[in-house]
Amino acid sequence: MAYDGLFTRKMIESLQFLTRGRIHKINQPENDTIIMVVRQNRKNHQLLLSIHPNFSRLQITDKKYDNPFNPPMFARVFRKHLEGGFIQAIRQIDNDRRIEIDVESKDEIGDTIYRTIILEIMGKHSNLILVDDKRKIIDGFKHLTPNTNQYRTVMPGFTYDAPPTQNKINPFNVTGTDALQYIDFNSGKIAKQLLNTFEGFSPLIANEIVNRQQFMTTQTLPVAFDEVMAEVNETPVPIFHKNHETGKEDFYFMRLHQFDDDITTYASLNELLDRYYDARGERERVKQRANDLVKFVHQQLQKNQNKLSKLAAELEGTKDKEQQQLFGELITANIYRIAQGDDSVTVLNYYTNEELTIPLNPTKSPSVNAQHYYKQYNKLKTREHELQHQMELTQENIAYFESIEQQLTHISVDEIDDIRDELAEQGFMKQRKQKKQKKKHTIHLQSYTSTDGMPILVGKNNKQNDHLTNKKAAKHHLWFHTKDIPGSHVVILADNPTENTIKEAAMLAGYFSKAGLSSQIPVDYTEIRHVHKPSGAKPGFVTYDNQKTLFVTPDYNHIQSMKNE
């Protein structure tokens, strides 16, 4: 992602107002995240320091975090040395993603002490380290011993050594013309050369420089380089970018020409990061918590699909039953012509007026041969009926697990257990051990408000779908669902909804479906009175009639703007 050295520079500039702010409280809500509540200008600011392998960053966040009852040891160390202290400086080291925060504090006996927080944003190698005024390590989130790291040691008591650098050039110290000496045009891959040459460059900004000109030459590269760096020095404009052709999306503090016009602008870098990482962080937590559930659903889906193929092949074999019945009839009709010991008989098929040769068992009498073919017919007929029944059940299971698979792409952490319980109730999983006193479960539906101010509710799992359709909605409310595609139930809780609201509800139904990333998704809608749940049907399954169909293309940004927190 685009939290590169240039973005870090802009973030550090925006955080300078925290200088002389007092560190009021320190929490560690997640294993890789520290929240420092800084009091400045009569207001509390949550300064987030994350070393998550994918979401490492420094920012002010407005998101509310749940803190553990017993703080981890690392948080206790931070509290001991930093709580009550004042931030003296926040700085970036060169143009790297290394950040240092100087803090003046007091020890147990009231003497002034100086501490420095060092945040190293390096992907999966990110680290958070606390050192004293002599750069001696007090503690580090990740300890590195000489046995595990040959370059440096990060352990309490050792002197802090910065991570090894690649001796890249600080782009703020050169011009576009200066940059030419580091680029070999004969080698090609100019963006990669820029990335490997300049400190703090991400693939995003390197590609942006290359895309600013049609061709990269000794004349166009300096122009593109200076143009981009000039915009870097301007006031940041936090933007979320998306490219519909490639599906690529990213954020940055300036307009990037490599993306199309699908952009969303935010008031601050912090708001941009909150919106961007909140959704991805939620998906990451869901992925961790529901990883076994995703695998189970996928396995069950494959298992039932394979079973359906085998049943279909077996059903194909029962098509011979009519011939077995015909053989029995023709033997009975011509029994006077057959002698015991004959291994076949040629007779006239009175249905087609063609001669037909029928195999016989020479050790059996003609009547026993006829009965054999009748028995084969009855066996195949019974087998056909059972196979058709099993295929219907298997197809129901496939549709059910496809709906669960779709729901897993949109659920929150709190909704994972609902799906586990549902699968257990349906007999697909073992029932979880419950506490003796189980609190009554409250069903929370995702709420949206249309552009015209009308409420729209979405069921994100089968329990929510059943509750919304069968209990929450009134008979005259409009109900939406993707046509022949697994998806969520969507209901407009308003009388006489506007055409625009109907289109937006249909867009929500398309988005919360298996075809959510497609365009021109067919969505049926009808009144709740025309929606029926068959007796004994699986959770979330309904039939409906008197429907109309709309074709919609979901707009993620528009959907987010309608969402009620």
Image (tube, rainbow, N blue to C red):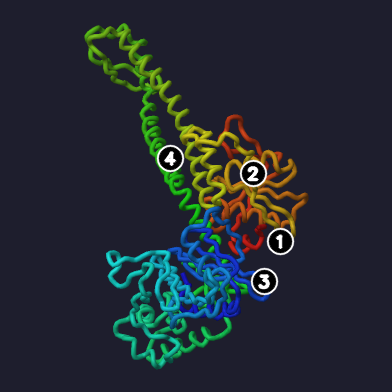
Secondary structure beneath disc 4? Answer: helix
Task: Name the N-terminal-most of marks 4 and 2.
Answer: 4
Viewed as shown, does residue 19 lie left or right of 503?
A: left
Along the line of sight, the residue nearer the viewer: 285 or 534: 285
Is 491 placed above or below 106 here?
Answer: above
Q: How much space separates mark 1 and mark 4, taking CA atoms? A: 40 Å
Task: Name the N-terminal-most of marks 2 and 1.
Answer: 2
Q: Quadrant of the C terminus?
A: bottom right
Of discs 2 and 1, which sits in the foreground?
2
Q: How much space separates mark 2 and mark 1, taking CA atoms? A: 26 Å
Of discs 4 and 3, which sits in the foreground?
3
Residue 465 on image: x %, y %: 62, 43
Secondary structure beneath disc 1? Answer: loop
Of discs 4 and 2, which sits in the foreground?
2
Viewed as shown, does residue 499 lie left or right of 280?
A: right
From the image, tell me which residue sits under label 2: 443
Tell whether label 1 touches label 3 (CB within 8 Å): no
